[in-house]
Image: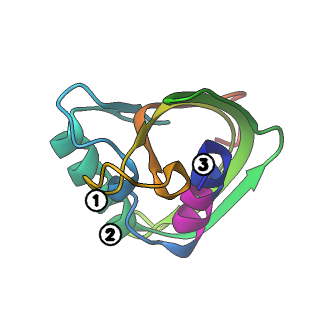
Amino acid sequence: MSARATVEDYYEALRRGEPLYPYFAEEADAVKFGVGETLVGYDDIAEGLREQTRTTTDWTVESDALRVVERESHAAFADSVRMAWTDTEREIEYDFDTRWSGTLERRPTDDDPNRDETTDEWIFVGMHVSVAHITEEQ
Protein backbone atom coordinates (compact mmCIF):
# COMPACT_ATOMS: atom_id res chain seq x y z
CA MET A 1 0.00 0.00 0.00
CA SER A 2 1.33 3.48 -0.83
CA ALA A 3 1.60 6.32 1.66
CA ARG A 4 -1.32 8.04 -0.13
CA ALA A 5 -3.43 4.90 0.18
CA THR A 6 -2.59 4.73 3.91
CA VAL A 7 -3.83 8.29 4.49
CA GLU A 8 -7.00 7.57 2.50
CA ASP A 9 -7.50 4.31 4.42
CA TYR A 10 -7.15 6.23 7.71
CA TYR A 11 -9.89 8.61 6.58
CA GLU A 12 -12.12 5.68 5.70
CA ALA A 13 -11.46 3.95 9.05
CA LEU A 14 -12.43 7.20 10.79
CA ARG A 15 -15.69 7.34 8.80
CA ARG A 16 -16.49 3.73 9.72
CA GLY A 17 -15.70 4.19 13.41
CA GLU A 18 -12.89 1.62 13.30
CA PRO A 19 -9.82 1.68 15.58
CA LEU A 20 -7.29 4.29 14.45
CA TYR A 21 -4.34 3.63 16.77
CA PRO A 22 -2.95 0.77 14.62
CA TYR A 23 -2.02 3.38 12.01
CA PHE A 24 0.54 4.94 14.39
CA ALA A 25 4.11 3.92 15.20
CA GLU A 26 4.43 2.13 18.53
CA GLU A 27 7.09 4.56 19.71
CA ALA A 28 7.48 6.97 22.61
CA ASP A 29 8.21 9.90 20.28
CA ALA A 30 5.18 9.50 17.99
CA VAL A 31 2.85 12.52 18.15
CA LYS A 32 -0.72 13.38 17.20
CA PHE A 33 -2.09 16.89 17.51
CA GLY A 34 -5.84 17.06 17.05
CA VAL A 35 -8.48 19.78 17.06
CA GLY A 36 -8.71 19.55 20.85
CA GLU A 37 -5.85 17.40 22.09
CA THR A 38 -2.12 16.78 22.11
CA LEU A 39 -1.10 13.14 22.30
CA VAL A 40 2.57 12.24 22.75
CA GLY A 41 3.82 8.67 22.59
CA TYR A 42 2.06 5.60 21.30
CA ASP A 43 0.34 4.82 24.60
CA ASP A 44 -1.25 8.29 24.78
CA ILE A 45 -2.19 8.17 21.10
CA ALA A 46 -3.78 4.73 21.45
CA GLU A 47 -5.72 5.73 24.57
CA GLY A 48 -6.86 9.03 23.06
CA LEU A 49 -8.03 7.39 19.85
CA ARG A 50 -9.82 4.60 21.75
CA GLU A 51 -11.68 7.25 23.74
CA GLN A 52 -12.51 9.16 20.55
CA THR A 53 -13.93 6.03 18.94
CA ARG A 54 -15.92 5.25 22.10
CA THR A 55 -17.47 8.72 22.43
CA THR A 56 -18.11 9.78 18.84
CA THR A 57 -20.23 8.69 15.88
CA ASP A 58 -21.49 9.78 12.46
CA TRP A 59 -18.13 10.88 11.09
CA THR A 60 -17.87 12.88 7.89
CA VAL A 61 -14.39 13.19 6.41
CA GLU A 62 -14.25 15.04 3.09
CA SER A 63 -10.75 15.40 1.69
CA ASP A 64 -10.32 18.41 -0.57
CA ALA A 65 -6.64 18.70 -1.46
CA LEU A 66 -4.62 15.65 -0.44
CA ARG A 67 -0.97 15.94 -1.38
CA VAL A 68 1.54 13.23 -0.57
CA VAL A 69 5.29 13.24 -1.13
CA GLU A 70 6.69 9.73 -0.89
CA ARG A 71 10.37 8.83 -0.70
CA GLU A 72 12.05 5.48 -0.18
CA SER A 73 11.41 5.22 3.56
CA HIS A 74 9.51 8.40 4.51
CA ALA A 75 6.49 10.32 3.31
CA ALA A 76 4.75 13.58 4.16
CA PHE A 77 1.17 14.60 3.54
CA ALA A 78 -1.02 17.69 3.73
CA ASP A 79 -4.74 18.10 3.16
CA SER A 80 -7.76 20.33 3.67
CA VAL A 81 -10.56 18.26 5.19
CA ARG A 82 -14.13 18.99 6.19
CA MET A 83 -14.62 16.97 9.32
CA ALA A 84 -17.89 16.50 11.21
CA TRP A 85 -18.99 14.15 13.97
CA THR A 86 -21.34 13.72 16.90
CA ASP A 87 -20.06 13.65 20.48
CA THR A 88 -22.29 10.95 22.00
CA GLU A 89 -21.61 11.90 25.62
CA ARG A 90 -22.40 15.61 25.28
CA GLU A 91 -24.88 15.15 22.41
CA ILE A 92 -23.16 17.87 20.38
CA GLU A 93 -22.57 17.87 16.63
CA TYR A 94 -19.29 19.36 15.43
CA ASP A 95 -18.39 20.50 11.91
CA PHE A 96 -15.00 22.00 11.04
CA ASP A 97 -12.88 22.89 8.05
CA THR A 98 -9.51 21.49 9.09
CA ARG A 99 -5.92 21.30 7.93
CA TRP A 100 -4.06 18.02 8.18
CA SER A 101 -0.35 17.32 7.86
CA GLY A 102 1.97 14.58 8.96
CA THR A 103 4.82 12.20 8.35
CA LEU A 104 4.87 8.48 7.74
CA GLU A 105 7.59 5.85 7.73
CA ARG A 106 7.72 2.72 5.62
CA ARG A 107 7.89 -0.35 7.84
CA PRO A 108 8.39 -3.97 6.79
CA THR A 109 5.45 -6.17 7.64
CA ASP A 110 7.74 -9.04 8.63
CA ASP A 111 11.42 -9.91 9.10
CA ASP A 112 11.75 -11.79 5.78
CA PRO A 113 14.94 -10.50 4.11
CA ASN A 114 13.44 -11.42 0.72
CA ARG A 115 10.25 -9.45 1.31
CA ASP A 116 8.63 -7.52 -1.48
CA GLU A 117 8.58 -3.77 -0.66
CA THR A 118 5.08 -3.54 -2.07
CA THR A 119 3.86 -5.41 1.01
CA ASP A 120 5.52 -2.97 3.44
CA GLU A 121 3.18 -0.75 5.39
CA TRP A 122 3.25 2.99 5.95
CA ILE A 123 2.74 4.11 9.53
CA PHE A 124 2.21 7.58 11.00
CA VAL A 125 5.00 8.93 13.19
CA GLY A 126 3.42 12.38 13.37
CA MET A 127 0.03 13.91 12.57
CA HIS A 128 -1.33 17.41 13.02
CA VAL A 129 -4.99 18.36 12.60
CA SER A 130 -6.05 21.95 13.21
CA VAL A 131 -9.09 24.09 12.58
CA ALA A 132 -8.70 26.26 9.51
CA HIS A 133 -11.43 28.78 10.35
CA ILE A 134 -13.61 29.18 13.40
CA THR A 135 -17.09 30.50 12.71
CA GLU A 136 -19.47 32.05 15.23
CA GLU A 137 -21.64 28.90 15.30
CA GLN A 138 -18.75 26.85 16.64
Q: Is 104 displayed left or right of 1 in the figure?
A: left
Q: Amino acid at mark 1?
A: Glu
The quarter of the displayed image where residue 25 is located = top left
Residue contact at pointers 3 and 1, CB within 8 angstroms: no
* Tag 3 residue: 7
Instruction: For mark 3, give the secondary structure.
Output: helix
Q: Is 93 displayed left or right of 27 in the figure?
A: right
| Earlier-in-chain disc, 3 versus 1 | 3
Q: Nearer the viewer, residue 123 or 115?
A: 115
Q: Is 77 displayed left or right of 62 in the figure?
A: left
Q: CA distance from mark 2 to mark 1?
A: 5 Å
The percent coordinates of residue 42 (x first, y second) are 22, 41
The mark found on residue 54 in the picture is 2
Query: Is residue 13 highlighted in magenta?
Result: yes
Q: Amino acid at mark 2?
A: Arg
The percent coordinates of residue 41 (x first, y second) are 21, 33
Color style of the picture: rainbow
Give the quarter of the figure containing the C terminus: top right
Q: Amino acid at mark 3?
A: Val
Residue contact at pointers 2 and 1, CB within 8 angstroms: yes
Query: Is residue 12 highlighted in magenta?
Result: yes
Judged by depth in the image, the label closer to the viewer, 3 or 1, is: 3
| Earlier-in-chain disc, 2 versus 3 | 3
